[in-house]
Amino acid sequence: QVELVESGGGSVQAGASLRLSCAASGRTARMYDTAWFRRAPGKEREQVAQITWSDSSTYYANFVKGRFTISRDNAKNTVFLQMNGLKPEDTAVYYCAARLSPTTGWTYWGQGTQVAVSS
């Protein structure tokens, strides 16, 4: 079992930055990778970025490339999402998720943290 707790959300104006954190506990040594997803009001959940724990390889959705950066701190079992140049359309609840292999679904989810960007 892996527990995930997000933090760092808030309300900001367009152009501002936020740094989200996802702290993992439990059987963290088994994690293969961790991702950030978001769900905006009235929209489907979408993946934002992901990072593997072994080699830090990353993936970004096109709509955040160049603005968001995902990173991890192995010693603290924490994944970060640095969000720069925020736009109103980035407003959503942001969730982190983890899985134990690349062939399984995203098994473990955090409770989410709200990000609100005003124009």
Image (tube, rainbow, N blue to C red):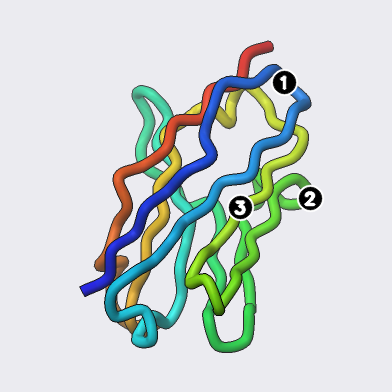
Circle 3/circle 1 CB separation < 8 Å:
no
Question: Can you give x and y, in whole percent of width and height, for residue 63 in the image?
Answer: 65, 44
Q: Which residue is mark 1?
A: 14
Identified at 53% across, 22% down, the residue is 116
The image quadrant where one finds the C terminus is top right
Q: Looking at this view, name the residue that lies furthest to the left.
A: 1
Measure how far apart labels 3 and 2 are at the Cα level.
13 Å
**What amino acid does circle 2 point to?**
Gly
Chain-order first, disc 3 or disc 2: 2
Rate crowding at label 3 as few (under 14), some (14 to 19) or many (20 or more) other CA atoms within 10 Å: many
| 46 and 94: which is toward the camera | 94
Q: Looking at this view, name the residue that lies furthest to the front.
A: 76
Judged left or right of residue 105, residue 114 is right
Q: Secondary structure at mark 3?
A: strand
**Residue 66, label in figure:** 2
Question: Can you give x and y, in whole percent of width and height, for residue 11 in the image?
Answer: 57, 21
Q: Secondary structure at mark 1?
A: loop
Judged left or right of residue 19, residue 23 is left
Q: Quadrant of the rendered structure where residue 34 is?
A: bottom left
Identified at 31% across, 66% down, the residue is 106
Q: Quadrant of the rendered structure where residue 1 is?
A: bottom left
Look at discs 3 and 2 and give the one toward the viewer: 3
85 is higher (above) or lower (below) than 105? above
**Residue 81, label in figure:** 3
Question: Can you give x and y, in whole percent of width and height, for residue 73 in the image?
Answer: 60, 71
**What amino acid does circle 1 point to?**
Ala
Measure how far apart labels 2 and 1 are at the Cα level.
16 Å
65 is higher (above) or lower (below) than 101? above
110 is higher (above) or lower (below) than 30? above
Measure how far apart labels 3 and 1 are at the Cα level.
17 Å
